[in-house]
Image: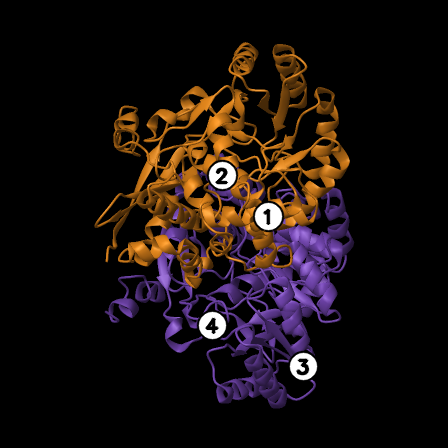
Chain colours: A purple, B orange
Amino acid sequence: MSVIVSLTVEDVRFPTSRELDGSDAMNPDPDYSAAYVTLRTDDGPDGHGFAFTIGRGNEVQCAAIRLLAGSVVGRDVEEVCADLGGFSRSLLADSQLRWLGPEKGVMHMAIGAVVNAAWDLAAKRAGLPVWRFLSRMTPEEIVGLVDWRYLTDALTPDEALDLLRAAEPGRAERAAALEDEGYPAYTTSPGWLGYDDVKLARLACEAVADGFDLIKLKVGADVEEDVRRLAVAREAVGPDVRIAIDANQRWSVPEAIGWLERLAQFDPWFIEEPTSPDDVLGHAAIRRAVAPMRVATGEHVQNRVVFKQLLQAGAIDVLQLDATRVAGINENVAILLLAAKFGVPVCPHAGGVGLCELVQHLSMFDFVAVSGSMRDRTIEYVDHLHEHFAAPVRSRRGRYLPPKEPGSGAEILETSRHRFRYPDGAAWSAES
Amino acid sequence: MSVIVSLTVEDVRFPTSRELDGSDAMNPDPDYSAAYVTLRTDDGPDGHGFAFTIGRGNEVQCAAIRLLAGSVVGRDVEEVCADLGGFSRSLLADSQLRWLGPEKGVMHMAIGAVVNAAWDLAAKRAGLPVWRFLSRMTPEEIVGLVDWRYLTDALTPDEALDLLRAAEPGRAERAAALEDEGYPAYTTSPGWLGYDDVKLARLACEAVADGFDLIKLKVGADVEEDVRRLAVAREAVGPDVRIAIDANQRWSVPEAIGWLERLAQFDPWFIEEPTSPDDVLGHAAIRRAVAPMRVATGEHVQNRVVFKQLLQAGAIDVLQLDATRVAGINENVAILLLAAKFGVPVCPHAGGVGLCELVQHLSMFDFVAVSGSMRDRTIEYVDHLHEHFAAPVRSRRGRYLPPKEPGSGAEILETSRHRFRYPDGAAWSAES
């Protein structure tokens, strides 16, 4: 029998605020960070996972992950890898820790990081990238990954089985198509608020030259500025490239509706996070008011229960799940199944640090084994910080190419972890 | 000028799980705990506040509070006390920390603990208990306490002003009535799942003898057990005492509806937490199905945005705010205003450690200056751990008596903090 012998946590932060990369109307100065967890076993590869944060507070996120060591260290590796559903449910079932959420915020993201590290471990032991590892599971195994509590009024395990069985026949063909063509991407690189017009126009043109047919701009700080920047971007890319906009939760519901009336002239492909991610009914009201403009949210949606309601209420046109906000791959599988049931396309949030590396596996699994479709689907792409990863994303002409390396993509190079460790790594200590 | 010279945090835990006090279907073995914060100034009383947790993870909650020291230490005490709205908004506005929620879970509760400590400080400096301190504010000052973001589709500042002005004339009379008669309470002491039938019947009879006309029983672990225990309780208290039931989030929506069909014969006064506190639409569906049984929730509702939706959706008959789950008194003032607008009675969650001491101030303020009513309103009362507080709750014949001591009620005696400090206090080190 082999066991998990340790769970260690590292506080890794990249000083991205120095260049205003990632600046938006809500988050002016993020330092992209990872509360990074490593599971070691006595007989094989390590498992890596992380929660993504934007700087201060990453140490609290690390402390929350460390708290889970007692529930993980000493467990039988083969058992964990053979029953990742049971593993994730066992972490969620600790009632004292559940009180800190329940199922939201710091403690929920901590569980997500550890669950994802177990997936990395399991996929590496199987010699497969996570998207393939998931795509080889039977419908019954996939259904067994999910914590069904609070879901059955919208989706039952039997309905999920039917969905998954319906998608079974085409799996091999779609996996081959992925290898050939990759998966659609869109880019936010031009659109950060901290960039001036020249940089915005230049980066927008470069994005189109690189093959992207959808770019995204941050909005929400000042409506006149937004009108001006959207005009600059539209002029730079021409009428055929789609432009999405992202308000990062800046608005109340009536404010969102008024502001979007001004921006509708630029025909945004979707408006992302117009208001609080908690406001299911608010998103539904905004969607009704701004139709046919499409409404998107999800990067800050705390768990499957809120996604369930966004779908039940007809509040969103685009579901933007995030790889590290919820309780790991298991909860994201539940969210993919819900989206498939309601026929809403999933366009994951990415960027930050390592989110592209992680989340591509979920979209590719969705294409192969769940929705079976790429229609209206695209993964956010930001060309930042990939060089720090053991298996960095590969993209070509505006598409993600499917990862070939075993695991989840979460592993950060040891040299980078060392250099950007907070506060004592060279990147930080040089500052003081 | 006087300043806040320090913010210190203590991890205080009471080993309540040893007696199964507080056991319910979701939380079998809580150790009631406080992540306890003290603000010291250079010229007056300390301010105390805490986040309530149930054991493991209290250290993470403490770490989150500690993180706020940088935003608090060195601030001008008079400025903070004169603008508690601005103070609370400044803590909520840190975008890097906001990412860890946003506005939910560990980081949000940390802000709540610090905000409440500032209220304790301000009220002590004014020589008033918090309920009186709040009740002397003008409608404009009260409206200025609130973070209005995400609320205006349901309640505008002007509407709140109208509500508060309408309640102004009767303030003095109602404060006097409070002094004379106290505020209604109900008790959960008999109803914990860990108690056997004999103890349940005995405690239920004692509660009635003590003057309570509403008791609450935990349900949700086993439906046959629930039927049996409700029959025991009903036999013990007779037909005229109301019995509420509390499922602590155990059920999915269809399960709640089926289970409650079995329990309806006992005419529960309300069903509390039938499902996930995140599930606005789920509560609305349950309420429609089990009417006229009343639906209650709130102790785990993360913030004002979710309360807003519960009210907008007609999902609850009883709003159970909690003193330490949201971002402190300021956010709870917003929640009281929302409840008043929608005409839903507020019956706060209490118990735990210190929640009775804190939350009574909010209900009393609501009676004096917001809703102006006690009708269908009652505060949970559990007779646990009050002896550890500098100003313990006083009750008489099933009613809370209004606190007279200056401050918020949060201060735990230094001897108790010392003895129950985790892990090195005598109450814990004796265990090993």
Secondary element type, mark 4: loop
Q: Are marks 1 and 4 in contact (CB under 8 Å)?
A: no
Give x and y (percent) for residue B281. Answer: 69, 46
Q: In this view of the protein, can residue B432 be seen by the observer? A: no
Residue appearing at x 64%, y 41% in the figure: B344
First in sequence, mark 3 or 4: give its number: 4
> Which chain is mark 1 on?
B
Q: Which residue is mark 2?
A: B172
The Cα atoms of the two marked residues, 2 and 4, are separated by 53 Å
Residue appearing at x 67%, y 25% in the figure: B268
Secondary element type, mark 1: helix
Nearest the viewer among A67 and A218 is: A218
Q: Which residue is mark 1?
A: B166
First in sequence, mark 2 or 1: give its number: 1
Q: Nearer the viewer, mark 1 or mark 4?
A: 1
Secondary element type, mark 2: helix
Give x and y (percent) for residue A305. Answer: 63, 48
Query: Mark 4 packing: few (<14 Cα in 10 Å), some, or many (20+)?
Result: many
Report the side of A187 relative to A280 (left or right). Answer: left
- Amino acid type, residue under disc 3 in the picture: Phe
Report the side of B214 relative to B387 (left or right). Answer: right
Label at residue A235: none
> Which chain is mark 3 on?
A
Q: In this view of the protein, can residue A274 be seen by the observer? A: yes
The Cα atoms of the two marked residues, 3 and 4, are separated by 23 Å
> Which chain is mark 4 on?
A
Label at residue A266: 3
Label at residue A22: 4
